[in-house]
Amino acid sequence: MDLNKSNDAVARRVAAMVSRVEGMKASDEYYYNMPVTELRGGAKVMVDGREMGMYASYSYLGLVGHPRINKAAQDAIAKYGTGTHGVRTLAGTLDLHHELEETIAGFKRAEAAVTYTSGYVTNLTAVSTLVGRGDYVFSDKLNHASIVDGCMMSGAKFRRFKHNDMESLERMVADAPADSAKLVVADAVFSMDGDIIDLPRIVEICRKYDAWLMIDEAHSVGVLGKNGRGIEEHFDLWGAVDIKMGTLSKTIPSVGGYIAGKKDLISYLRHASRAYIFSAALPPAQAAAAKEAFQVILDEPWRVEKLNANTKQFIGGLKARGFDTMLTETAIVPVLCGADETAFAITRYAQKKDLFVLPVVSPAVPVGLARLRATVLTSHESEDIEYAMDVIAEAGRQVGVI
Ligand SMILES: *Cc1c(COP(=O)(O)O)cnc(C)c1O
């Protein structure tokens, strides 16, 4: 296709995006796709020749670069090489994949688990394999894009309930025919706001109306619960979630995604979900790294404790400085700015002072709710966090947010 010659809808769409990106670059507001050249423990990184404090990473427990995890990956390469022989169903399965799935099942106290090559694809394939035409799927308004895409792809009747509003959910579920198949799906920790789903209430509703419950733990594994085992440990509601979804790319320093649950459910997904059947297996190094990481979380409980302490310091310190951090209780900390321009201005200031922190603006969040979306990590030291908060406060004062 010659973009210069055609002026159809595709060409116009391409041109509109390119012009928006170029505009942001020209006004020094483009902070995306910045290459990190060196990991200095993960809480500090090198970017463009300077050291920056990292406040945008999802390596919550600081496991990226952990010696045990690196060694597990290296040993796996030495033994199996760098790729698999295709899809899991045919020649792609290694003993390592089974060991990883057993480890995940143990960590999540589930009967079994199945893995996929990304978290995104895990949601897409799980939702669209479990429900279809004639069924109902209920999704929190702030759920991750991969869940939304899975719901649309499924062909089921797709209902979005108000964010973490259990009355809104119950009204919708009660409205669906009693004999229809129903799936309720939500993030455990919401990825833009850092707040936690009301698990006790959502479980009650699912039980009352005989609906399946799926929870995405991308930002709760390693973060919630005394041992970092996630949302069920946090609420002491073991067994409450039917479909326990998570990624291997955030706290777990690898790539991939999983579903844990009852063994029949896992067997069904292993034999019916298209992303398992038609996409290659996780590479050996990534499977081995993920497996080791779950074991490290349990062997080094101080990491979860320190994350909790750092989170308290960061949220408490920002509030004391006059910021609105919305409803977060976790390591994802929104710093409300208001207008998109204000969020860009604070980001620009923070970046100049060597903080790697990023803005989230419309349409990713509603107009008027633009924010910095900062993450706090186990690997941050207390004085790093104080410095970061002081920089954000200087910027906030300059633009009149505080
Ligand atoms: C990051 C994320 C995913 C996707 O996981 P990847 O492993 O990055 O593909 C899914 N759900 C939520 C809530 C996420 O934050």
Image (tube, grey):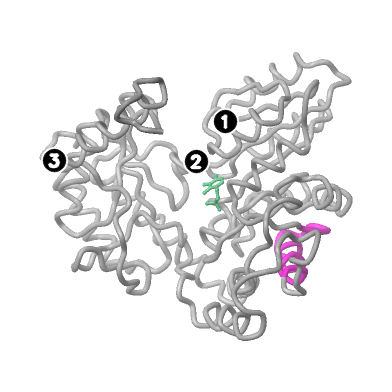
Q: Is residue 206 above or below residue 388?
A: above
Q: Per the image, is 212 magenta?
A: no
- Distance, label 1 to label 2, CA atoms, is 9 Å
Q: Is mark 3 within 8 Å of ligand 1?
A: no
Displayed quadrant of residue 230: bottom right
Residue 195 got which mark?
Answer: 2
Whole-percent x and y of residue 57?
40, 57
First in sequence: mark 2 or mark 3? Answer: 2
Apparent side of residue 363 relative to residue 144 in the rendered image (left or right): left
Displayed quadrant of residue 335: top left
Whole-percent x and y of residue 225?
60, 57
Q: Amino acid at mark 2?
A: Asp
Apparent side of residue 383 relative to residue 90 in the rendered image (left or right): left
The segment highlighted magenta reads 97-113
The answer to whether the residues at label 3 and label 1 have Cβ atoms under 8 Å apart is no
At mark 3, the secondary structure is helix
The answer to whether the residues at label 1 and label 2 have Cβ atoms under 8 Å apart is yes
Q: Dot 1: within a 10 Å radius of its alpha carbon, few (fewer than 14), some, or many (20 or more) residues? A: many
The answer to whether the residues at label 2 and label 3 have Cβ atoms under 8 Å apart is no
Dominant secondary structure of the magenta stretch? helix
Q: Amino acid at mark 3?
A: Arg
Q: Is residue 61 above or below residue 74?
A: above
What residue is rendered at 35% in x and 40% in y? 325
What residue is rendered at 59% in x and 51% in y? 119
First in sequence: mark 3 or mark 1? Answer: 1
Apparent side of residue 314 relative to residue 159 in the rendered image (left or right): left
- Distance, label 3 to label 1, CA atoms, is 32 Å
Q: Which residue is the site of mark 3?
A: 397
| Quadrant for the C terminus in the image | top left
Residue 164 got which mark?
Answer: 1
